Image: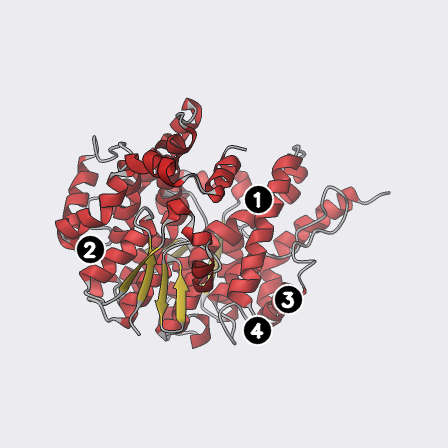
């Protein structure tokens, strides 16, 4: 859109939602600047950031004075404002509904369960804190249920979650489902490893997003490598 | 073939979908799903949705779950008045923002308080431990504070002068604990005034009718005694407390 000023994205790439937003901006060549807000340093709780977003959460979008939170809302706003290809957020009600269905379901399903895994497998061990094996079993069971539904309710026999083309749904989902790092048993932890259908879906989505995907995930890959190096036998 | 809406009015999202259809005079067939009897786990309902939750919309062969998606679909398909889900980009974004936030805030905490006050005692015969109850109420209070400070502020409705899907979803969620005797509107004059405005826009009778079931939730104990406790409920309760 000619003459339109760049939007500002407040991000911490440890967050799945932030990665989804960055990928979308880059992939669709939407002019933007990034302000990195380091959650681990408490930068989301500074007076300045709290003024911007009283809920102290990321990501945040600022579009020439218009401040928007919640990644669902941000992605849908960007998709419409920048007139991106229709498949991202189709205009036809029946097709749009499928994307809306996923973005709603994501909150209390994919997102919650993968966040728990990340917490148990990556963050707690990295911070040297003990994990709770019993609780972890429950978390794994919940995730299993979520992945079943992802496969049988959304993906089914389609190439992408909502049909023949990639959409916001795939973008949000894939950022939740990248391989994390080593489990406490020293084995590579890929929560999709026993699910060939979801594995090929993930590859398909990653291919469609190519460089933008890798760029956004560089931080996570670094954490993973750092952790791997720590655990490797000498 | 008419539009079918699979609903149980104990469920907040079912109420928002019902009210939206009624307010906008969208013709539909009300397909009752009795959650307290575990009907969502039955064979019939399984054919409609494998997630086994309500609400579900069935429009011919098109089946849709998730109330937010259903509301957005109905608004588009039936060309409802613009204020419900504005075409103005920034106004729409504000509605989407609230509809996204509420999933893990008002919805989660309102539901928990409802379960702890309204369902658990009916099932177990004893109240939930004070510590857990207090924590749940504290979380709900925090959500309500954010709702008032960030989403409502001093506006008549969430996004401005007119009611939208955001207000509809908010009101049904906030009403959930009220049915168990926890009047969250007491001591919150701004919230009460907003509730009155929303009720007026929806239609007081229509609103009260949709909430009749939840306002009589103290009959649940008797219901379980009469029908027996469904297995899924026992399991759910076990998981909640482990």
Q: Element at badge 1?
A: helix
| Same chain? Circles 1 and 2 | no
> In this figure, which residue is indicated by the disc labeled 1?
A116
Front label number (1 vs 3)? 3
From the viewer's perspective, is residue A87 above or below residue B174? below
**Sequence-wise first label, 4 or 1:** 1
From the viewer's perspective, is residue A96 above or below residue A51? below
Quadrant for residue A83, please give it: bottom left
Where's residue B16, x and y in %? 28, 54
Q: Are marks 1 and 3 in contact (CB under 8 Å)?
A: no
Q: Element at badge 3?
A: helix
> In this figure, which residue is indicated by the disc labeled 3?
A197
Q: Output the chain of dot 2.
A: B
From the viewer's perspective, is residue B56 above or below residue B191? below
Q: Are marks 4 and 1 in contact (CB under 8 Å)?
A: no
From the viewer's perspective, is residue B171 above or below residue B178? below
Q: What label does residue B163 carry, if any? A: 2
Q: Alpha-carbon distance for marks 1 and 2? A: 36 Å
**Sequence-wise first label, 4 or 3:** 4
**Sequence-wise first label, 1 or 3:** 1
């Amino acid at each position: 859109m000619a003459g339109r000023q760049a939007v500002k994205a407040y991000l911490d790439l440890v967050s799945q939602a932030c990665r989804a937003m960055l990928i979308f901006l880059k992939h669709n060549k939407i002019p933007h600047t990034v302000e990195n807000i380091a959650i681990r340093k408490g930068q989301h709780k500074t007076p300045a950031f709290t003024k911007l977003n009283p809920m102290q959460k990321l990501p945040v979008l600022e579009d020439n004075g218009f401040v928007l939170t919640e990644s669902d809302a941000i992605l849908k706003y960007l998709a419409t404002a920048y007139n991106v290809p229709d498949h991202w957020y189709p205009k036809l009600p029946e097709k749009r509904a499928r994307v809306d269905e996923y973005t709603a379901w994501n909150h209390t399903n994919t997102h919650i369960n993968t966040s728990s895994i990340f917490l148990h497998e990556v963050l707690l061990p990295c911070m040297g804190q003990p994990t709770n094996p019993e609780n972890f079993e429950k978390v794994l069971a919940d995730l299993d249920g979520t992945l079943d539904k992802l496969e049988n309710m959304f993906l089914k026999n389609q190439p992408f979650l909502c049909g023949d083309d990639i959409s916001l749904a795939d973008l949000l989902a894939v950022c939740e489902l990248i391989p994390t790092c080593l489990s406490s048993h020293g084995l590579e932890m890929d929560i999709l490893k026993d699910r060939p259908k979801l594995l090929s879906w993930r590859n398909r989505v990653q291919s469609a997003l190519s460089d933008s995907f890798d760029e956004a995930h560089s931080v996570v890959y670094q954490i993973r490598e750092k952790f791997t190096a720590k655990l490797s036998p000498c | 073939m008419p539009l079918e809406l699979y609903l149980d009015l104990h469920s907040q999202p079912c109420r928002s979908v019902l009210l939206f259809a009624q307010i906008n005079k969208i013709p539909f067939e009300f397909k009752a799903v009795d959650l307290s009897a575990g009907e969502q786990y039955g064979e019939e309902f399984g054919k409609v949705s494998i997630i086994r939750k309500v609400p579900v919309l069935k429009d011919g062969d098109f089946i849709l779950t998730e109330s937010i998606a259903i509301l957005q679909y109905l608004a588009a398909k039936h060309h409802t008045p613009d204020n419900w889900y504005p075409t103005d980009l920034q106004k729409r974004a504000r509605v989407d923002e609230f509809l996204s936030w509420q999933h893990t805030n008002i919805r989660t905490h309102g539901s928990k308080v409802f379960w702890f006050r309204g369902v658990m005692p009916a099932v177990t015969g004893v109240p939930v431990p004070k510590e857990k109850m207090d924590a749940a109420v504290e979380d709900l209070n925090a959500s309500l504070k954010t709702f008032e400070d960030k989403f409502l502020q001093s506006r008549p409705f969430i996004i401005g002068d007119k009611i939208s899907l955001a207000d509809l979803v908010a009101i049904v969620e906030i009403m959930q604990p009220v049915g168990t005797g926890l009047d969250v509107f007491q001591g919150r004059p701004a919230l009460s005034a907003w509730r009155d405005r929303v009720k007026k826009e929806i239609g007081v009778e229509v609103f009260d009718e949709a909430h009749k079931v939840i306002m009589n939730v103290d009959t649940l104990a008797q219901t379980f005694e009469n029908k027996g406790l469904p297995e899924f409920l026992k399991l759910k309760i076990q998981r909640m407390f482990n």
